[in-house]
Amino acid sequence: MGLFDFFGRKSGARAFEKHAARAANKRAQGPDRWASLQALGEMKTPEAVEALLQRFTFRVDPSITDQEEKDLAFHAIVGSGEVAIEPVKAFLRESDAIAWPVKMLQKLVVEAEVVGELVALLESMDTEYERDPQKKIDTIMQLEEYQDERIRPAVEPFLDDVNEATRFHAVGTLLRQEDASASREALLKALAEEESVRVRVVLLDGFIEHDWELGKAVSEVQKKLPTGYVLDGTKVRKK
């Protein structure tokens, strides 16, 4: 390595560190942070992508500035191409909010790979109480946008989640799948046991839409029929 190469590398490393620190600093001056985001975007390395991803861990005022900076970071990450894939996947697993990393993956990889990452993320979660289940809810909501045979077995356990919103979105996601009929028994069990009115309503609407029989659960379902629904033999319909 020549002397100029050595000093060039040191200078480049210092520049990267400066821009990475500034991009992740919500108290930095807006124009300085913007310039650092642009500089990181031009590097197109995994390390630069990791630094750009830190911009999605905080908010700044005014909101329009926050959105513009995140849009800049988003396009820089996506524009980095293949080198961005693994850092974005890692950020999806680590971040509390998943909307941005999912949007990035949708631009970087094929749909089946996006689903695979979301399914793997959901499978790392459980149905027990947690103080903030929002990431779990968001993951199930994201899966609702897809139809894939891996989704049903991943989502079904969350019909028994302690959190009502999680159960609500689990039902909606399962009902949207092409193989929704494979979840009929699990959904029927949920319908017989569910205490939440809004979850029962989405379950009942699903049974009506799919023209499913209630089978032996008729009596249990009848006890909790919300207003506007009636039994018609072993099926349910709206009044």
Image (cartoon, grey):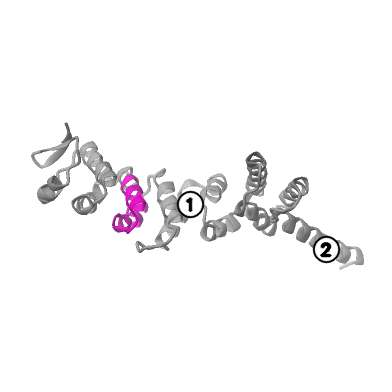
User: Which structural element holds mark 2?
Assistant: helix
Residue that extends furthest to the top in the rendered view of this protein: 239
- In what quadrant of the picture does the C terminus appear? top left
* Horizontal arrangement in the rendering, residue 120 relative to residue 185 (left or right): right
| Image x and y of residue 179, in percent | 29, 46
Is the C-beta separation of discs 2 and 1 under 8 Å?
no
Q: Which residue does the numbered mark 1 point to in the structure image?
A: 113
- In what quadrant of the picture does the N terminus appear? bottom right
Residue that extends furthest to the left in the rendered view of this protein: 233
* Horizontal arrangement in the rendering, residue 105 relative to residue 30 (left or right): left
Up-down: is 239 above or below 135? above
| Image x and y of residue 154, in percent | 35, 56
Q: Which residue does the numbered mark 2 point to in the structure image?
A: 9
Q: Residue at x 90, y 66 (%)?
A: 2
Q: Is residue 154 magenta?
A: yes
* Cα–Cα gap, marks 2 and 1: 36 Å
Q: Amino acid at mark 1?
A: Glu
Q: Nearer the viewer, residue 41 or 179?
A: 41
Q: Nearer the viewer, residue 174 or 225?
A: 225
Residue that extends furthest to the right in the rendered view of this protein: 3
* Horizontal arrangement in the rendering, residue 80 relative to residue 168 (left or right): right
| Image x and y of residue 73, in percent | 66, 47
Q: Is residue 98 magenta?
A: no
| Image x and y of residue 75, in percent | 65, 43
User: Which structural element holds mark 1?
Assistant: helix
Magenta segment, which residues? Answer: 149-172
